[in-house]
Image (tube, helix red, strand yellow):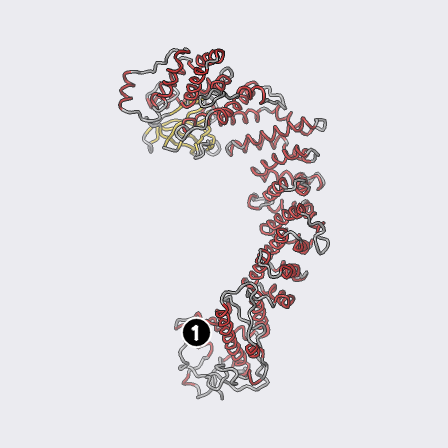
């Protein structure tokens, strides 16, 4: 498979009418049993996989273009092309195709693109060719009519194209163009415009090669200046010869390359500026023109890549201190245009392109350029750097890590990028935004490679946090030494917002690197200083940074936040915001709501213990009262672990419904039958026989009594809510003094299990579960912050469900009841 004659690239035409490179391989032709016919086969040169398997259909129209291209359509919207490395290989495969279809290999197209009508087939049999009128001034109108009438019919287009090719007709038409211009024959020039435009719509590569040749292209452009729809002719030739200047920043020694550059520029100009915008029906007729430009660009980039002397001189002059500023600017602009040109290449070609630039030393050259004072040169260098980062960030990362072993931190390429971002003089920070995006791409673990021996993520992030992070955070640390930002102008705020955006990205995507840096450098405290900024967007950026940290639910972060009291700036900002219903208000409430919903116990306790007095009056949302409720439930569990176990038992009872599980519960709790017990004897499990009855019943009584109190609170709050309707942010929920007295009363009579003040409690005389208790054992039940929120909390639901389960349970008959002895 080393025969270069058979080496091809496979292209397919996408929906945007652009050619996509499907790979490079070697083509062959042979009989394929599955397809039942002779087929074209292309196997990848890299791994031998099958890139193309296409049957040579006798009715498919194959076109041969530019001596090294074969193009055809396999379906209505599926075009294919083979681009051969050598003309000989193209000719060889073309002969195979023509042999299968029974065509003469000298033709450039094997079939008509669309089936012609029966009448046209009869005409074709009777008149094998199209006879063109003689090329004379007096017959220009007749020629124009012939071209226009041929365009609708594929067969007539084919005949017209062959006649134009065989007779050298285009050059004769261009000679008439000079005569018409000399005679100022406007009518003849208008006819020539229609004729040349029609030839473009024939969509034939062979005709394009004649029209775009060095001797003809300017005359073709001249013909297209005389549009009959315009009162005055355009001056395209004047622009191309006088205004548009070709600059050779490095002399191009290859004349073929130079001619190809001129040709491509002019053809692109014809397509974009000279030809009228094609109609829907004409658009597909110019597909060959698009292909002509595309393959020219591929060829130019390839020829420049192969010219080692050219690229060596280019990079040598770029980095030479003796090069004057104007010359260096031209060199950088050329390199920028060269990189932009490469964007038309397919991934494989682009990969080879950037690999060549890397081998020539583009990154060290950019480092030198970025260290210069010329802002225009630096701007162009930044654009080049963006092409490199967007296409291959791993190549850039590898370079900067190798560079760190030889140079100081100040002159590292990545630090130069950060400094340019920080020092952007643009009031809108357009360049800084672009550079921040590039830095984000470089530190994004999603595009980092991992191999068996090393992990790029570990190595690069270790390098970045050691050598670069201090440069990135320098403006943040310099501006937050006091309680308020030392500089709070708009441009500084924009810059700090960009820095915070990148740091927030790091918190989300990096692990211990950013965590160690934030905790060791006390970064969060410094960031929260920006909550006092007069610019709301910056304060929100600082809040978003903290919210991202809390969202990780990492106890290392939580302990750092609690130790440094880092909720204080947030609470201050919340209180200073007052009753304004804005984004700051909503964002802060959402952060506390997240802590409540996710039940982050350490932060809940910290907030309530330190900031409850400041937040207790906020009742237009139930977030803070919900936090207080979480805190009290958490404290009760800590103070009374038996109560916590009782909750879990009741919760288990809620979910266990099958008979077998109920029997297990009965055995666990009672372990004796009703028949074996004396009447009135309390039942306990064997393991608890030695325990005091009071120890068992005390948590049950407290739990049931507190649940009844909560039910009465819920009813009263819901009643008030229904009466008041939808609450506004300024609405404050209040309870009557009588309710508050009931919630906080500590009189023994109100809290004794059997007292009238606790109707329906487990300890009342009518309850089947009452046991004797001393007054000292019956502690007063108080509910701090006993307001029940308007938002449903999970614990409330559990309590309600437990109560429902209790009501649904049948009376205890099988086992002995708890009774007073």
> Residue placed farthest to the front in the image?
231
In the rendered view, tell whether residue 762 sits above or below residue 490.
below
Residue under numbered circle 1: 805
Residue 103: quadrant of the picture:
top left
Residue 41 in view, yes or no: yes
Give percent across and percent down for residue 101. 33, 23
Compared across the picture, whether 265 is left or right of 91 comes to: right
Number of numbered tags placed on the structure image: 1
Disc 1 element: helix
Give percent across and percent down for residue 368. 68, 33
The residue shown at (59%, 54%) is 548
Compared across the picture, whether 518 is left or right of 186 comes to: right
Compared across the picture, whether 346 is left or right of 332 comes to: left
Say which of 61 and 172 sits in front: 172
In the rendered view, tell whether residue 514 sits above or below residue 740.
above
Say which of 672 and 421 sits in front: 421
In the rendered view, tell whether residue 601 sits above or below residue 376.
below
Give percent across and percent down for residue 203. 41, 23
Give percent across and percent down for residue 330. 64, 27
The residue shown at (56%, 20%) is 258
The residue shown at (60%, 25%) is 308
Residue 519 in view, yes or no: no
């Amino acid at each position: 498979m080393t025969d270069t004659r058979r080496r091809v690239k496979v292209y397919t035409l996408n929906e945007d009418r652009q050619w996509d490179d499907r790979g490079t391989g070697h083509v062959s032709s042979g009989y394929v049993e599955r397809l039942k016919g002779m087929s074209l086969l292309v196997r990848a040169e890299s791994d031998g996989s099958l890139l193309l398997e296409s049957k040579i259909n006798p009715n498919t129209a194959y076109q041969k273009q530019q001596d090294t291209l074969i193009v055809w359509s396999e379906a209505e919207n599926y075009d294919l092309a083979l681009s051969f490395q050598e003309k000989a290989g193209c000719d060889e495969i073309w002969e195979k195709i023509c042999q299968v279809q029974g065509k003469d290999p000298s033709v450039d197209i094997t079939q008509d693109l669309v089936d012609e009508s029966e009448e046209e087939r009869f005409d074709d049999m009777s008149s094998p060719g199209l006879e063109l009128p003689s090329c004379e001034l007096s017959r220009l109108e007749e020629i124009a009519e012939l071209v226009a009438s041929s365009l609708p019919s594929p067969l007539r287009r084919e005949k017209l194209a062959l006649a134009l090719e065989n007779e050298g007709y285009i050059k004769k038409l261009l000679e008439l163009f000079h005569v018409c211009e000399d005679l100022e024959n406007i009518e003849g020039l208008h006819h020539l415009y229609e004729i040349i435009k029609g030839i473009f719509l024939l969509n034939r590569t062979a005709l394009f090669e004649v029209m775009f040749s060095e001797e003809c292209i300017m005359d073709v452009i001249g013909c297209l200046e005389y549009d009959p729809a315009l009162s005055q002719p355009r001056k395209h030739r004047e622009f191309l010869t006088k205004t548009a200047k070709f600059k050779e920043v490095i002399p191009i020694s290859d004349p073929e390359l130079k001619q190809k550059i001129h040709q491509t520029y002019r053809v692109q100009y014809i397509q974009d500026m000279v030809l009228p915008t094609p109609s829907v029906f004409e658009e597909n007729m110019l597909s060959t023109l698009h292909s002509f430009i595309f393959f020219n660009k591929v060829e130019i980039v390839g020829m420049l890549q192969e010219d080692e002397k050219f690229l060596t001189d280019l990079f040598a002059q770029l980095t030479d201190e003796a090069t004057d500023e104007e010359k260096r600017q031209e060199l950088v602009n050329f390199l920028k245009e060269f990189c932009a040109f490469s964007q038309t290449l397919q991934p494989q070609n682009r990969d080879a392109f950037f690999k060549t630039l890397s081998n020539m030393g583009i990154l060290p050259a950019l480092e030198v350029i970025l260290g210069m004072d010329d802002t225009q040169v630096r701007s162009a260098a930044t654009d080049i750097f963006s092409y490199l980062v967007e296409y291959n960030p791993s190549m850039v990362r590898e370079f900067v890590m190798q560079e760190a072993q030889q140079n100081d931190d100040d002159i590292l390429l990545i630090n130069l990028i950060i400094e340019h971002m920080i020092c952007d003089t643009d009031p809108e920070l357009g360049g800084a935004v672009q550079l921040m995006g590039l830095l984000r791409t470089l530190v994004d673990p999603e595009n980092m490679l991992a191999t068996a021996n090393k992990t790029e993520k570990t190595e690069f992030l270790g390098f970045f946090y050691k050598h670069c992070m201090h440069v990135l955070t320098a403006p943040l640390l310099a501006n937050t030494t006091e309680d308020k930002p030392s500089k709070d102008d708009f441009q500084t705020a924009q810059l700090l917002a960009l820095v915070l955006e990148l740091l927030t990205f790091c918190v989300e995507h990096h692990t211990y690197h950013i965590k160690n840096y934030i905790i060791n450098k006390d970064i969060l405290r410094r960031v929260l200083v920006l909550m006092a900024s007069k610019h709301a967007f910056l304060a929100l950026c600082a809040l978003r940074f903290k919210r991202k940290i809390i969202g990780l639910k990492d106890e290392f972060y939580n302990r750092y936040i609690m130790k440094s009291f880092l909720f204080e700036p947030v609470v201050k900002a919340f209180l200073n915001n007052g009753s304004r219903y804005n984004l700051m208000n909503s964002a802060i409430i959402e952060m506390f709501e997240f802590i409540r919903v996710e039940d982050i116990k350490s932060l809940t306790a910290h907030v309530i213990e330190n900031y409850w007095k400041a937040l207790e009056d906020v009742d237009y949302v139930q977030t803070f009262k919900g936090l207080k409720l979480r805190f009290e439930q958490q404290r009760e569990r800590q103070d009374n672990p038996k109560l916590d176990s009782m909750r879990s038992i009741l919760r288990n009872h809620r979910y266990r419904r099958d008979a077998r599980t109920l029997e297990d519960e009965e055995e666990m709790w009672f372990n004796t039958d009703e028949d074996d017990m004396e009447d009135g004897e309390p039942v306990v499990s064997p393991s608890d026989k030695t325990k005091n009855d009071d120890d068992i019943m005390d948590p049950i009584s407290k739990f049931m009594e507190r649940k009844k109190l909560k039910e009465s609170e819920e009813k009263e709050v819901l009643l008030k809510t229904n009466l008041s309707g939808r609450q506004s942010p300024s609405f404050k929920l209040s309870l009557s003094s009588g309710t508050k007295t009931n919630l906080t009363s500590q009189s023994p009579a109100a809290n004794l299990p059997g007292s009238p003040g606790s109707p329906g409690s487990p300890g009342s005389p009518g309850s089947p579960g009452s046991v004797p208790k001393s007054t000292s054992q019956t502690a007063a039940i108080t509910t701090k912050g006993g307001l029940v929120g308007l938002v449903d909390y999970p614990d409330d639901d559990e309590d309600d469900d437990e109560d429902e389960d209790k009501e649904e349970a049948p009376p205890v008959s099988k086992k002995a009841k708890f009774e007073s002895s």
